Structures are given as structure tokens and as C-alpha cells.
Image (tube, helix red, strand yellow):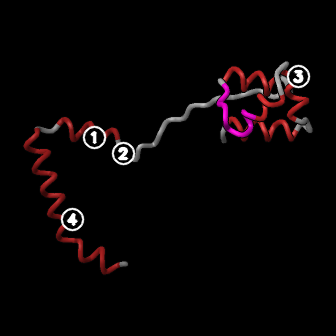
Amino acid sequence: MSAAQLLREVRRRHGLTQQQLAARARTSQAAISRIERGLVSPSAATLGRLLHLMGEELELQARAVDWGHDPELLRRNLAKTPDARVRDGVAFSNFVRRHQGAARAER
């Protein structure tokens, strides 16, 4: 959810107009409008302050990204010699070529 969407949703949930929120924040209705339309990207501090004025708290979270790889498998492969990695890559390539027809037949 963008800052614009979040601010608009919270403001509406609290039944406030842009003008009313602007008055609380001691800014202009146009400034609130620019944020809500995504024309201006407020800092986290500004967004947090606007939400606080409506009795809400901004929470930022971080989550680990799943890159879709196995770190342990990568460590084991990197521990191999370059020759061993090339041999394994060639063997895998040959395996894929041998089984391409089977994969197409299953579709």
C-alpha cells in the first residue's frame, strides 16, 4: 500500500475531510491532496505525524526476502572445485536434454 493510499484510507476511516486533517497538521488542504494523489511522497516521519494526528501509529516492518534459492546448497556447490562444478553443470545439462521430450508430452 502506498503512502497516498494509506493516508486517504485512514483519513476517511476517521471521517475527516482533507481540510480538517490539514487544519490539525497546520498545513494546507492542497498539501494533503498532493500526498493523497501520489504527487508528493511524504517522509516516514511526516506520514507518521499525520497518522498520529488521527490517533493511529505508523508501523514499518522488514521481512526476509525469499530469493528462491537454498543457501546451504549454494555453500556446498561453492566449496567444490571449479572442475567439479563444471562437471556437475554438464551432467545437469545432459539430464535436462534427455528429459525435454517427457516434459513436453506432459503438457
Q: Which amino acid does label 2 sit on?
A: His
The answer for how far apart the CA atoms under marks 4 and 2 are is 19 Å
Left or right: residue 59 compared with residue 71: right
The answer for how far apart the CA atoms under marks 4 and 1 are is 20 Å
The magenta-colored residue range is 34-42
The kind of secondary structure element at disc 1 is helix
Q: In which quarter of the image is the N terminus?
A: top right
The answer for how far apart the CA atoms under marks 2 and 1 are is 8 Å
Q: Which residue is label 1 attached to?
A: 74
- Is residue 84 depicted above or below 21 in this figure? below
| Dot 4 alpha-carbon crowd within 10 angstroms: few under 14, some 14 to 19, many 20 or more | few
Residue sitting at x 78%, y 35%: 33
| Residue 38, image x, y percentages | 67, 38
Mark identifier at residue 58: none
Looking at the image, is mark 3 or mark 4 earlier in the sequence?
3
Q: What residue type is labelled 3?
A: Arg
Q: What residue type is labelled 1?
A: Leu
Looking at the image, is mark 4 or mark 2 earlier in the sequence?
2
Looking at the image, is mark 1 or mark 3 earlier in the sequence?
3
Looking at the image, is mark 2 or mark 1 earlier in the sequence?
2
Disc 2 and disc 1 in contact, CB within 8 angstroms: yes
Number of the front mark, 1 or 3: 3
Q: Which residue is label 3 attached to?
A: 24
The kind of secondary structure element at disc 4 is helix
